[in-house]
Amino acid sequence: MHAFRSYIDAGISTPVSDADFARICAAFTPKKLRKKAFLLRAGEVCKHFAFVLAGALRMYSVNEKGGEHVLSLGVENWWVGDRESCVLLTPSRYYVEALEDASLLLITHAQMQELLCTVPAWADLMRGLDHRHNIATQKRLEAAISSTAEERYVAFRAQHPTFERRFSQQLIASYLGILPETLSRIRTRLLAAKPQLAEVLS
Amino acid sequence: MHAFRSYIDAGISTPVSDADFARICAAFTPKKLRKKAFLLRAGEVCKHFAFVLAGALRMYSVNEKGGEHVLSLGVENWWVGDRESCVLLTPSRYYVEALEDASLLLITHAQMQELLCTVPAWADLMRGLDHRHNIATQKRLEAAISSTAEERYVAFRAQHPTFERRFSQQLIASYLGILPETLSRIRTRLLAAKPQLAEVLS
DNA sequence: CGGAATCTTGAAAGTGTTCAAATCAAGTGG
DNA sequence: CCACTTGATTTGAACACTTTCAAGATTCCG
């Protein structure tokens, strides 16, 4: 919980009062998720948006041919959930699955709306979050439509240095929109060109 | 201006008061832009975020090889601008150019913050906007990493039926992340397969 | 009527995918 | 501790899709 308060204070100009923090906490429900457990499956309505206290999750879609595409990776201090389904209460097209044992704080859209109205600092925080999320998604989109797989992988490594060791290559490949085989070839190619990166990659 | 008020009222639960609408209008500066004129060039700070009253604009980046990539198309009742640059006041990597003579309402980030604090309805509206923008960008990202060019084009046509006649094929191709030649071939292929679409495409 | 931009079409090259097999790694139960 | 199973990664060859470069055809405007 202390980590949660630090996260909140880091996102706004003046620290939240104890009273506001209590209000915020009251809106959330703690939840633990075992590795490989699901928070959401396609077809279900995403009742909760989740803040990740510990662990890691992925949100992904599955196409007709059974191929999976990772839309987002959520680790400590990130949010996961299908915004669209959560807001409109429509069935989701996504799965949200724990990649590691995870500790979450859940909030419904209704409780979120309530918080936004009653705690101005929370509204500030969420606005900043939406902003950063918008910017990050747009950058990823730009990379997807304008860069080669190798460029996207190099950029990904620069942006998320810790993900390389934490997540499997097939996961990263899916996040980048390529096949695991392709990522494997890219890595061998990069290693051949820049052997000094060996320890970072292995 | 009447169109602007309709846009606002459509996005919130209860219509804005005259006083609030006056406050909102006071925060904006009208601006006309001739076709091919720029609202923003790469390297500049995006001082204003813009609401489009009439006309059309595109935001695009230019890579080392001179290739352009359209990040967004803005038409009536859409917003255009580089969020990141506007908020952080950092130099932008994008160009924003009028595709048709355009009529805009400009607002600085500071004025936007002011409005968000003083007019709660405006904060609601912007929250909804950020939401929809997030959802739309994520869908486009998903399409970019999981669909073929042809699938993306078909989905694009379904989502933006009016854009087909309004914008050139090279513009649409750039938006989809493919070359104009590729889009031309895709269209020929689709027409051969489904001749009944002829009048829609031409 | 030009002239310029846009769209179309072709052939060759490049990039990433598909399918298949081999190798490697990790965890389980005996 | 070893044998076994399971999943992840690597590698290969053929294939598919998209790009590149180039040349024509078409359309749009002044």
Image (cartoon, coloured by chain):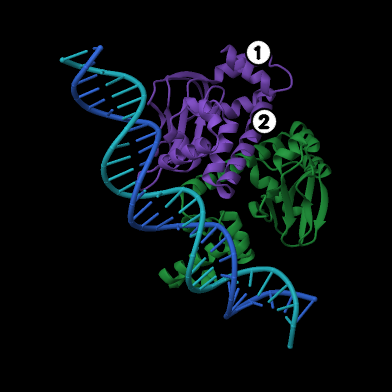
Chain colours: A purple, B green, C cyan, D blue
Q: Position of residue A73 (x, y in %)?
A: 50, 31
Q: D13 or A42, which lies in front?
A: D13
> Which quadrant of the structure image shows residue A184?
top left
Q: Quadrant of the N terminus of chain A?
A: top right
* Structural distance between the alpha carbons of marks 1 and 2: 22 Å
Give the number of the disc on residue A128: 2
The amino acid type found where label 2 is placed reads Gly
> Which quadrant of the structure image shows residue B117?
top right
Determine whether, in the image, residue B123 is placed left or right of residue B133.
Answer: right
In this rendering, the answer to whether A61 lies above or below B195 is above
Determine whether, in the image, residue C18 is placed left or right of residue B117.
Answer: left
The chain letter for the residue carrying disc 1 is: A
Q: B8 or B17, which lies in front?
A: B8
Q: Are marks 1 and 2 in contact (CB under 8 Å)?
A: no
Marks 1 and 2 belong to one chain = yes
Determine whether, in the image, residue A104 is placed left or right of residue D25.
Answer: left
Give the number of the disc on residue B116: none
Is label 1 in a helix, a strand or a loop? helix
Is label 2 in a helix, a strand or a loop? helix
The chain letter for the residue carrying disc 2 is: A
Residue at x 41%, y 69% (from the top left corner): B193
Residue at x 67%, y 30% (from the top left corner): A128
Please give the residue where the numbered disc 1 appears in the rendered image: A19
The amino acid type found where label 1 is placed reads Ala
